[in-house]
Image (cartoon, grey):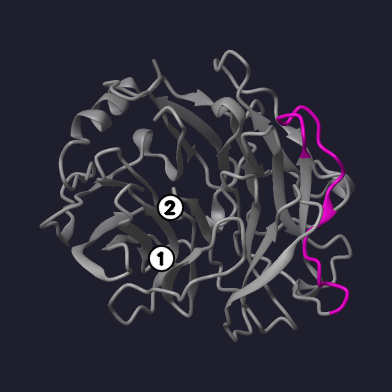
Amino acid sequence: MIGQNLFRRWIILAGISVVALTPGVAARGNQTGHPRVTVLRTPQGGIQPQVAVDARGVLHLLYFKGDPSCGDIYYARKAPGAAEFSDPIRVNSQSGCAIAMGSVRGPQLALGRNGRVHVAWMAAHPEGPERAAPMLYTRLNDTKSAFEPERNVMQFATGLDGGASVAADKFGNVYVVWHANPQHNGEAHRRVWVAWSSDEGKTFAREIPADPFIEQEPTGACGCCGMRALTDEGGTLYIFYRAATNEIHRDTVLLVSRDYGRHFVAEWVAKWELNACPMSTDFISRTRLNTLIAWETAGQVFYARVAPGGDKISEAVAPPGPGGDRKHPVVVSNARGEILLAWTDGTAWQRGGSVAWQVFDEGGRPLSQKGNLPGLPVWDLVAAFAGTDGRFTILY
């Protein structure tokens, strides 16, 4: 039973308001009132956790472990009321084929029809067309006992660099998304590509470009920045990424498709003039009423709401404070409409930092629940989810 003691300790401590599993490290934050926030270390010393909760309340956990340049991906789940996570399962069949360097290239997961788990990641080894890094995908098998052997879904659009993403809906559609430039002629000519499956990931069509305005006004894509894809309850597909127009306009752009990835409309979310790659990540999550997005601009993190099935975005909300070193935000909501925005603070290339968070009420006003926890490992990210009791949990 791999790492069972660590998984058992994770669950036992989950009832405490703020928990640090690293000896000598304590959280700093105001936890008065509701909801409470729990901060937990990823089991087995893993990094870059990804979480999702399905319709039955099962918590699904994905994380990276090993050498950041050639490590492995693990998966575990916890049923409602269960005292422990399931034993972790290695996701990748080829050992050491995942990468975590830069904090933007790690694996992502999505839940599809009947709660099936789908995972996609940028591979560590050059095995694709022209020996380009392949875009790998796998899914949990029918018995939920193991993952199928990973496949390269990239048939044409080579030139991977920053992170990719995966989305799935209850209708059996699965989308693997990445940005690349087959011509290898700079960030300003990178495009967003989508490989679509209509049969739960059994087969994928050849990838197509998702950015509809590239011929008239090329936006590019920031080479070392991550991206996110998500489907809402009605099957609308969202893709959130950072542009690189003329290699100086690092604006965040939201693509929205209401016809299963065949056509997209675009909404510019936030502008940023920068003649460099900020190595940032974006985030999308679903709530019962709308979609939430989170991003970084110039060292500050923000979140906003997106209207159901549409591309209308609310006014951006930032946590109190000047920012400066805030990166890699995640945003989730509980059943009361309260919102947790969590992020990394002080991270940089080959440098860890701390976990920070702020809770907001339904109207976007900051509540007293906020904090900062040092000890974030190098290349690590944060993940978060809301429990049925309205409490939030952050993993790092």
Specify the amino acid type for callout 1.
Thr
Residue matched to label 2? 380
* Quarter residue 128 falls in: top right
Residue 53's quadrant in the figure?
A: top left
- Callout 2 secondary element: loop
Secondary structure that dominates the magenta span:
loop
Q: In the image, residue 232 lies at what x, y percent?
A: 57, 48
Dot label at residue 158: none
Judging by the rendered image, the residue that carries numbered circle 1 is 347
Provide the residue span drawn in magenta. Answer: 197-216
Seen from the viewer's position, the closer of residues 132 and 119 is 119
Q: Amino acid at mark 2?
A: Asp
- Whether label 2 touches label 1, CB < 8 Å: yes
SS class of the residue under badge 1? loop
Q: Residue at x 58, y 29 (%)?
A: 91
In the rendered view, tell whether residue 12 sits above or below residue 323.
Answer: above
- Residue 158 in view, yes or no: no
User: Is 45 displayed left or right of 234 in the figure?
Assistant: left
205 part of magenta stretch? yes
Which badge, 2 or 1, comes first in the chain's sequence? 1
Residue found at the far left of this picture: 32
Q: Residue at x 67, y 73 (%)?
A: 243
Q: Relative to 318, is 106 above or below?
A: above
Instruction: From the viewer's side, name the closer residue of 74 and 230.
Output: 230
96 up-or-down from 232: above or below: above
Mark 2 crowd level (few <14, some 14–19, many ≥20, 10 Å Cα)? many
Is residue 262 visible in this depiction of the protein? yes
Residue 314 in the image: x percent, y percent? 48, 72
Q: Residue at x 88, y 50 (%)?
A: 156
The residue shown at (33%, 21%) is 4
Q: Which quarter of the figure is the N terminus placed in?
A: top left
